[in-house]
Image (cartoon, rainbow, N blue to C red):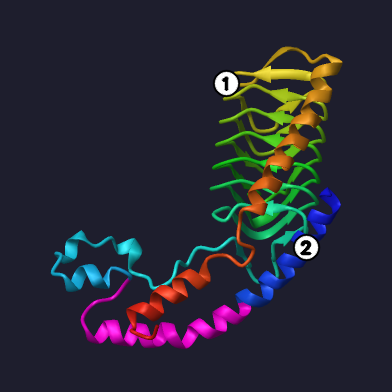
Amino acid sequence: ASTRRARLRVCLRSVAMVLRNALARAAAPLRGAAQAQLSSAGVIGTLAPLARLGAPRHYRNPVENELYDRSRQEYSLGNRVPSVAADAWIAPNATLIGDTDVADQCSVWHGAVLKGDLGPVRLGAFSNVQERCVIDAAGAATRIGQYVTVGTCTSISSAVVEDNVLVGARSVLGAGSYVEANAALEAGTVVEPGQLIPSGQLWGGNPARYVRDLDGNEVLEIQTIAKNVYGVAADHADQQTPWGLDYVQAEALRRALGRE
C-alpha cells in the first residue's frame, strides 16, 4: 500500500507541474489587467474592497500590496537549482534556495529554509528538517546524512552531520562543525565552529559538552524516529493539494474583476 501511495504521489507531482505552468500562463494577462484597473481606481493590492469602503490608507498592510503571493517553495539562482526526490515532502511554506538536494523519503517542514546560495546543501535519504530550521552553506558545503532528525528552530551552517543522528530543537551547529554517525545532541546545544561530536555519544549545553555514551537501544531509536517522522509527513502530503493554491487566487482575482 505504501508503494502504491508513493507512486500515486509521483504521478500527482507530474500533473501538478503541468497545472502550475498552465496556471502561470493563464494568470499573466489577468494580473496585468487587474493592476491596470486597480491602478486607475487609485487602489493597488488585494485590499481593494476594503479601500473602496473608505478605510484609511495607513490601515492597509504594505506586505499585502500584491495580487499574488510572491513566495514559493523553490528558488533557482542561475544554474543552481533545487533538486527534490519524487517521494520527498516539502511543506507548502518551506523554502529551498539554490543548490539544494533533498533525497528520497525526506521531509522539510513548515517555515524551514534550506539555502544553497553560497554553497551546496545536501539532505540525505530518510532525514527530516523540522519547523523553522535554517540550513545554509556559507562558502563550504553543508551535508546531512541519512536518518537524521533536525529538531525545530535549529540552525546549521557549513557543517557535516553523518548518518543516524538526532539534533535537538533550537540547536546551533557552527561552520566547520562535524557530528559523527550515531550521535545525539540535546535541545539547545551549541556546537562551536570546527568542533567534533564523536560517534555514539550524547552532547549538550552551550558550548556543547560531553554528557554520556548512548546505548544500543538509543542508537536504534534514532532511526526509528526518522522513519516515524516520514510516516507523519506522508499523512500531511495526502491532505495537501499537489497543484498548490494558485487556482484559489486566480478565482478571487476573477471575482474582483467581475469576470466570474
184 w.r.t. 253: above or below: above
Residue drawn at point x = 43 percent, y = 85 percent: 30
Tell me if 28 is positioned left or right of 141 in this view: left
Residue 229 percent coordinates (x, y): 70, 38
Q: Answer with the quarter of the image where residue 152 lies.
A: top right
The residue carrying mark 1 is 206
Query: Which of disc 1 and disc 2 is earlier in sequence?
Result: 2
**Could you tell me the amino acid type at mark 1?**
Asn
The residue carrying mark 2 is 10
Q: Answer with the quarter of the image where residue 58 lies.
A: bottom left
Residue 28 percent coordinates (x, y): 49, 84
Viewer-side label of 2, 1: 2
Tell me if 38 is positioned left or right of 68 in this view: left
> Which segment is the magenta one?
21-45
Q: Is residue 43 magenta?
A: yes
Residue 223 percent coordinates (x, y): 80, 31
* 86 or 208, nearer to the observer: 86
Tell me how far mark 2 sits from mark 1, CA to CA.
43 Å
Residue 102 percent coordinates (x, y): 74, 53
